[in-house]
Image (cartoon, rainbow, N blue to C red):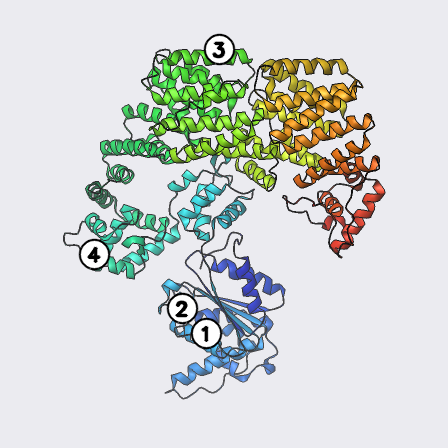
Amino acid sequence: MTSVASPMVGREAQLRALLDAVTQPPAVALVEGEAGIGKTRLVRAAIDVLRDGGRTVLLGHCHQLREPFPYGPVFDALRHVAAALPATEALNPVTGALRGYLPELAGHLPPSPPPPPVDDPRAERHRLFRAVRALLDAVAPAVLVVEDLHWADDGTRDLLRFLTDHPPEGLALVVTFRREDLPVPGLPLGHAYRHPPGANSLVISLKPLDVESVRTLTSALLGRSQVTERFAARLRERTAGVPFLIEEVVRSLLDGDGQFPGGVEEPEALDRVAVPLLLREAMAEQLAGLSPAALHAVHAAAVLKLPADEPLIAAVSGIAAPSRSGLREALKAGVLMEHPDSHYGFRHALAQQAVYDAIPGPDRRLTHRRAMPALAALDPPPLVQLAYHARRAGEYEAWRRYGGAAADQAAALGDVPLAVELLEGMLADPKLPRDARGPLALQLSRLAAIGLSHRRAVRMLRHLLSDDFLSREVRGEARLNLGVLLSNQAGAIAAGRQEVLAALPDLDGRPGIAARGLALLAMPTWGREPIATHKKWMDQAESLLVAVADEDRELTATVYANRVTFAMLVGSPDAFALADTLPVNDPSAAVRRQVARAYSNLCDAATALGHYGPADRFASEGRRIAEESGALYPAYLVEVSSIRLDWLTGRWDGLRERAAAVVEMTPETPLLGVDAPLVLGMLALARGEWEEAGERLEAAGPRDPDSAFLPVAAAASGGLVELHLIRDSVDAALSEADSAVTRLRRKGVWVWGEQVVPAAVTALLRAGHPGQAAELVAEFAAGIEGTTAPAAEAALESARGALAAAEGRFEEAARRHGRARAAYEAMPRPYGAARAAEAEAGARLELGDRETAAEIIAHAGERYTVLGATHDAARCRHLLREIGADSRPRGGRKARGVLSPRESEVARLVALGQTNREIAEVLFLSRRTVDTHVARVLQKLGVRTRNEVPPPPWSEAPAG
């Protein structure tokens, strides 16, 4: 019987069904499933519930190695029934027939009845069966569980069949079994089960866990938050979703503290897992009964690893006159199974590994050698498989040749992850010849820089760089690629830039590679250097590239992609013309991967500038090229950048869930998905969720000048300034504004200040520093002059409008804010347009134009409501009330239990834990009004306390 040592996951529906059946006796529940699938765990979970309900629970087990003891599992269960028995005189006299079988109960049972005629064993068995039935009836309500029925003796099966045919009124019988191991296939009781009238009958077939359940189970075993979906998917692939195997595999990976080495789950580590003992023993038992021909076929399938057709299995098996009978026998025994296209193999990888491990070493190597010519004869030859067999056969030169060719082929076809995996595997193998390590390390560093996985590659490259066998030039390029990997995929910007700088001295004889390093350093979004330094690096990269431009098109594309990105990031007027010259249709997949990277960068840069239409086009084109060329990292960046783009352009439906998913996916490399916390913070700010807004915006990088992505960090600072002003923390707002403006001033790229500069101007004016505000506006205007940056131009109008209003020039203020509103509408940027409209309305109110102001405010409020900007919509309603132009819709009475839009807003904030005073501040209502709304919410939802108010879905926005 399988031991239970883990939580039950993914079986909630089956548990409910089992409990429903057994709590309404008489009942029979058959629980079937393969070894380790969780039959015992399900039954034990039900038993825990049933015992609390006052039922007698009797548990018996069938064992693979059993002594001659008919009915043993049932009698083992009955030995523990004494406490539930009534007085002896209340028992059916026939139960006395059990005295000889159950000596533990002798003092509780009636005297033994007279024996039947000695020549009628059937009568003796029938009397025994009736005695068992009567005893179970006496302890009802009772649940009898018999586990692993596939190992039961015939007598036990007969007894259980008798009980199912004539069940006591208060008995529920539960049996577990493996269908594939039954003596009579499909018949756990030996004969067809007939559902008796009046009895509940249930068959539960346990299936493998899906990826999400595997993820939950693994997390429960570790006692921490969920592991990554990629790890869970690979774990399911390796274990076929069998819970027992999942547990064993996870435990085999853990260190002494019960955690993954390094605290990180790596899907690649699953390929090195030893097969659990239970599966090895089970497979050995199955193999023991096979004929030599069948065993050869199974061994060939195990060595081939992948499902194969009959001719290939025959060739690898080494049988001179291959017979189909061996394969047929292996299929009939269930050792092998048929896969699509007349291929044959194992049910899952661990079964294959169990058989493989059982093959003697010399035989394994010989079989691998036979596989090599058989596979090499195929058209085209499977290079990955050939490399695998060459390594296992000890043919190291062939392994090196096939492995390198397989990595080249994978990269050429766009399968970068496979190429990286092959190279990592070869470099990690101590059998790889020393002279092969340099070229392969270089190849790995080049490919890893455009892939998405990085942890293992970073460790391996650092290990290789610490050795002295690499030449100076190879070391320089590998270190450069490590810097790229750290800066991009790993999000360790400062460490990556240090590696690039350290690589440059080793690349003085390779101008092309040095140009690539300089082009990376030239990206101005990172680091503290001024834009002039970045431009110098970019110019040096382009000058070095002249000497090798015709020799290495990929390198040329790499540097050129950064040149185009640089132009777009700083708002250069020629950026779009440069983007049109990217080699989109180059025949080289390597060149197109660099183009994909360029488009992902252009999408991000255009988004920061306010060119949202072009940003959408760059995203679409970048995604297309990335997918066709196998550039996973650029494809990922496009998806992340699209989150910020959708926030700015008002596509908020489902946006919070998407952004949260990115944050969850990148817990260890948050800089990869830095747009996501920014968007989550700004969405929270618009909804009045101050605590979340602050936490999310802080996570977007404003405190990390060395590694922050500066356009996003500047936007986050703008949000934090607004948050501090909302909370009347003017000093904190000034401090945040000063820090952000200082970074912009030092970098010299003012087009990235479009969200922080207007907020900083407002903070300065609130603090009574109009002179400093005017100086900042003038500096901002000079900084964006000559650029093409619609968002910065609109922000400049807003900032000038705020200055004009502060100086009493309301006509100019209204005009400035009106221009900003029109500019935001043209981008389009609906939230920005609504904010500008509010400011314009404020100026018009000062001019006495209440009617126009009310119309503008009402329109802005409607825009906020559609977006789901709860706090902003409430502010507009408050303004309308103040000027006597409340435009709330007058509808009929709401149905009982249906929340009004205002009540929905209040309910959401209550569910978030905000007090009535805080809700009043967010929604611009009086405390008394909020008290009334909260009372109505509780009444309509049918709950007694505010702690019971459920939160709405993230994407839900109050309508109206």
Task: Pinpoint residue 16: horizontal percent, then vertical percent.
Answer: 56, 62
Q: Do callouts 2 and 1 mark residues in contact (Cβ within 8 Å)?
A: yes
Q: Secondary structure at mark 4?
A: helix
Distance CA(mark 2)–CA(mark 3): 82 Å
Task: Pinpoint residue 80: horizontal percent, then vertical percent.
Answer: 54, 69
Task: Pinpoint residue 392: horizontal percent, then vertical percent.
Answer: 27, 39
According to the image, label 4 marks what residue? Answer: 293
- Residue 526 appears in view: no
According to the image, label 1 marks what residue? Answer: 160
According to the image, label 3 marks what residue? Answer: 536
Quadrant in the picture for residue 447: top left
Distance CA(mark 4)–CA(mark 1): 40 Å
Q: Is residue 927 above or below residue 708?
A: below
Distance CA(mark 2)–CA(mark 1): 10 Å
Could you classify mark 4 by the number of other residues whose Cα lies within 10 Å: few (under 14), some (14-19), or many (20 or more)? many
Q: Is residue 470 above or below residue 128?
A: above
Amino acid at pointer 4: Ala
Q: Nearer the viewer, mark 2 or mark 4?
A: 4
Amino acid at pointer 3: Lys
Q: Is residue 781 above or below residue 933?
A: above
Q: Is residue 937 left or right of residue 141?
A: right
